[in-house]
Amino acid sequence: MMLKMNKIVVSPSILSADFADFGSAVSQIDLSGAEWIHMDVMDGSFVPNLTFGPPLISALRSRTKAIFDVHLMTVNPRHLIKDFADAGANLISFHYEAEENIKENLEYIRSLGLKAGIAIAPSTSYNVLEEALPFLDLVLIMTVNPGYGGQILIPECLEKAEKLAKMRENLNLNFRISVDGGINEQTAEQAIKAGADTLVIGSAFFGNPDKKGLVSRLQGN
Ligand code: DX5
Ligand code: ZN
C-alpha cells in the first residue's frame, strides 16, 4: 500500500549560522526558498551546549514571515513555552525525555495558538508516542544525539520515520514527521524514503554556496 505523503518542508537550522550575524542567516534562508527556520534552544543542562532564548527569536520575528520551528532541548520545557510563544514561535517541540506531562504540555502549546511537537532522542523508541499522537502536529526524530550541529546521521533512527508514517496512516492522523541531525542531500533521500516530510538541515545548508538549488532539490522540484 502506498502511504499518504505530505509535501516536503525544509527547515534550515540557524545553529550552523554565523552567530555574529543571525539577521543575515534569516535573509539567506528566505532567499533559498525554505519556508521554515529551525531554532535550537539549548539550556546547558538537558544538553551540555548553551545557545539562545526568546530575545533572539523576537528580534528576528520582524525580519521574516517564515515559520519559526523552535526545538527546545531544555529541562522543564513547560515554563518556557509562553515566552517563546510571545517571542513569535509558530511551532514548539519539546523533548519526550524532558517532560512528564506530555499531553497537557501539547494542549498548552496548542491553546496558545501554536503548533505542537515532540522530539525524541536516538535512544527513545517511537512506541512511547502512541498515546500522544492525536495531540501533536509534528514528531521530531533526532537522527543524531542532541547538542551539536555537524554530526553524522545514525541510520537506525530512520526506521522510526517508517513506523510513525504507518501509525499515522492507520490512525488517520496528519502530523508531520521531521528528521533532525546529519541531514544532507544523500541522507535526506533516505529519510524521505523512510517517511520523513520535514527536513532540518544545519551544516549542509550553511556550508552550501547554492542554497536555492539545494532547497529546491530537497523539496523535490
Ligand atoms: C542538534 C540540533 C540540530 C542541528 C542539526 O542537536 O537539534 O537541529 O542544528 O545540525 P546538522 O544539520 O549540522 O546536523
Ligand atoms: Zn534541532
Image (cartoon, grey):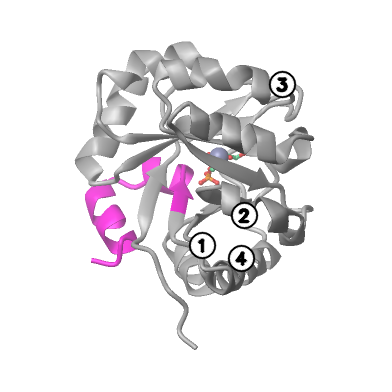
Ligand 1 picture quarter? top right
Question: Mark 4–mark 1 contact, CB under 8 Å?
Answer: no
**What is the three-letter code of the residue carrying label 4?**
Leu
According to the image, label 4 marks what residue?
Answer: 164
- Packing grade of label 1 (10 A; few <14, some 14-19, many >=20) is some
Location of residue 57 by image quarter: top left
**What is the three-letter code of the residue carrying label 1?**
Leu
Query: The C terminus lies in which quarter of the figure?
Result: bottom left
According to the image, label 2 marks what residue?
Answer: 133
CA distance for labels 3 and 4: 30 Å
Location of residue 126 by image quarter: bottom right
Question: Mark 1–mark 3 contact, CB under 8 Å?
Answer: no
- Tag in front: 1 or 3: 1
Which element carries disc 3, helix, strand or loop? loop
- Name above or below for residue 203 compared with residue 170: above
CA distance for labels 3 and 2: 29 Å
Magenta span of residues: 199-221
- Packing grade of label 3 (10 A; few <14, some 14-19, many >=20) is some
- Residue 148 % position (x, y): 62, 36
According to the image, label 1 marks what residue?
Answer: 173
- Name above or below for residue 57 compared with residue 102: above
- Packing grade of label 2 (10 A; few <14, some 14-19, many >=20) is many
- Residue 164 % position (x, y): 61, 65
CA distance for labels 1 and 2: 8 Å
Compare residues 63 and 17 and report the one nearer the observer.
63
Which element carries disc 2, helix, strand or loop? helix
Question: Mark 1–mark 2 contact, CB under 8 Å?
Answer: yes
Residue 207 visible (yes or no): no
Location of residue 103 by image quarter: top right
Compare residues 95 and 203 and report the one nearer the observer.
95
According to the image, label 3 marks what residue?
Answer: 44
- Name above or below for residue 86 compared with residue 173: above
